[in-house]
Image (cartoon, coloured by chain):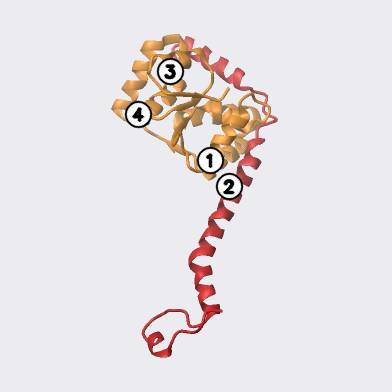
């Protein structure tokens, strides 16, 4: 039974769009009050950028407010051990992971909880190699 | 109906005096918090439903998002 999750930006996007594959799975996990949920500030930045560039700042703000009110904590971890772990992940997986991916991955590793992410091949490979615990939403 | 407690005992306690008082106390201590928690849960579920379609008009899918991330990764970001 999962007690805590780190949500990647892709999972948050899938939650806000009912038309996305995996939407229901993310929604069910967000609904569950017994699961502690977190998203890294860098992933929030990614989401905010996508929304504000296409729908405007006020829509992006509304989504951020909603994320707060749903009890999803925004983690601002960026201590030395954290950014070094991000760098290690980037070195290991080079072109397969972005800095945003690394923030989500490093947070899940630091908390020792599963990352709720997409079915991206890089994530699946890391899960197989026990580098992360992965829970895919699609 | 719960009979009232004897007066001497009540003089030094805050035990409810009548059945109605007792029911009031039960409501205050047990039922009200449970109702409040239940209402909070319902509010949350309502909020999740409301949030779920907030970006249905966004012309960027999860696949688009992942593709743009991959593009950034290939440029060192």
Visible in this render: residue A68? yes
Marks 2 and 1, how far apart at CA: 10 Å
Marks 3 and 1, how far apart in space? 24 Å
Residue extending furthest left?
A80
**Label 3: how many Cα within 10 Å (few below 14, some 14–19, many 20+):** some
Q: Mark 3 points at which residue?
A: A127
Residue B53 placed where, x, y %?
A: 67, 35
Residue under mark 1: which chain is it in?
A
User: Which of these two is toward me, B71 or A9?
Assistant: A9
Chain B's colour is red
Kindly report the distance in space between the C-alpha atoms of the residues bearing marks 4 and 1: 22 Å
Whether residue A51 is visible to the viewer of this picture, yes or no, is no
The answer to whether dots 3 and 2 both sit on one chain is no
For marks 3 and 1, the one nearer the N-term is: 1
Q: Chain A is drawn in which colour?
A: orange
* Circles 3 and 2: CB atoms closer than 8 Å: no
* Residue in the image at 40% along x and 30% along y: A113
Q: Residue B44 carries which label?
A: 2
Query: Is A28 positioned to the left or the right of A108 in the image?
Result: right
Q: What element carries label 3?
A: helix
């Amino acid at each position: 039974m999962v007690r805590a999750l780190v949500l990647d930006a892709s999972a948050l996007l899938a939650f806000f769009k009912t038309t996305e594959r995996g939407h229901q799975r993310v929604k069910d996990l967000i609904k569950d009050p017994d699961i502690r949920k977190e998203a890294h500030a860098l992933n929030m930045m990614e989401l905010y950028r996508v929304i504000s560039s296409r729908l405007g700042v006020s829509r992006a703000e509304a989504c951020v407010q909603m994320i707060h009110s749903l009890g999803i904590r925004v983690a601002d971890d960026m201590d030395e051990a954290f950014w070094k772990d991000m760098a290690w992940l980037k070195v290991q997986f080079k072109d397969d992971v972005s800095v945003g991916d690394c923030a989500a991955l490093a947070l899940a590793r630091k908390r020792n909880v599963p990352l709720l992410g997409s079915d991206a091949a890089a994530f699946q490979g890391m899960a197989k190699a026990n580098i992360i615990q992965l829970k895919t939403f699609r | 109906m719960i009979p009232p407690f004897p007066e001497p005992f009540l003089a030094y306690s805050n035990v409810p005096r009548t059945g109605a008082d007792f029911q009031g106390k039960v409501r205050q201590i047990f039922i009200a918090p449970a109702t409040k928690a239940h209402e909070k849960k319902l509010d949350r579920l309502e909020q999740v439903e409301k949030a779920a379609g907030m970006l249905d008009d966004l012309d960027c899918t999860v696949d688009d998002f992942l593709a743009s991330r991959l593009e950034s990764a290939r440029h060192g970001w």
